[in-house]
Image: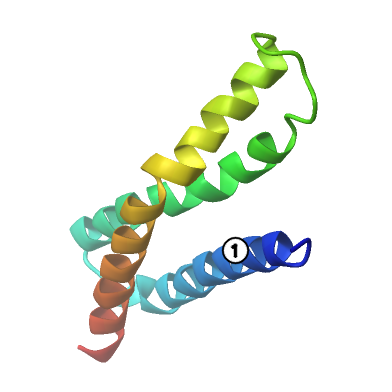
Amino acid sequence: MRLILPLVVLVIVLAFCGVVYAAYLAWPKMRPGKRVLGSLLLTPHFLLILCIPFSLSGGSAPMGSPGWNAAFSADVLVIFILPLPALAGTMAALVIFRNARIG
């Protein structure tokens, strides 16, 4: 069970890095509008990666303390709000970057 969390974090970070690499390869061939759209579509994935350390830093802080509130907010974002937009945005951005490289 302890091995699952680092593997999930690794998969999330590697997926983001792979799409960013695809963006790097397609960047010179893309119009400015597609560049902005691709960057905006990757924002939820970036926020998901950013929230993971805050989610893990809660520890055993007392309920209602600033540390607990930050960890709870990050947990809610990581579990309920960000996964679906991150997945959909990453897939859409990958399609945009792939089509820019091909065409």
- Looking at the rendering, which quadrant does residue 11 occupy? bottom right
Identify the residue at image location x=40%, y=46%.
82
Q: Point out the residue furthest to the front here.
A: 1
The amino acid beneath tag 1 is: Val
Identify the residue at image location x=75%, y=13%.
62
Q: Quadrant of the N terminus?
A: bottom right
**Image spot of residue 66 (x, y percent):** 67, 12
Identify the residue at image location x=80%, y=25%.
60
- Residues 77 and 20: in front is 77
Q: Dot 1, how many residues are within 10 Å of its Cα: few (below 14), some (14-19), or many (20+)?
A: some
Q: Point out the residue furthest to the bottom here.
A: 102
Q: Is residue 47 above or below residue 17?
A: above
Q: Point out the residue furthest to the top here.
A: 64
Left or right of residue 50, residue 63 in this image? right
- Looking at the rendering, which quadrant does residue 12 occupy? bottom right
Identify the residue at image location x=51%, y=71%.
15
Q: Quadrant of the C terminus?
A: bottom left
- Residues 40 and 64: in front is 64
Asked which secondary structure carries label 1, the reply is helix
Which residue bears the numbered disc 1? 13
Left or right of residue 83, residue 53 in this image? right
Q: Is residue 86 above or below residue 64?
A: below
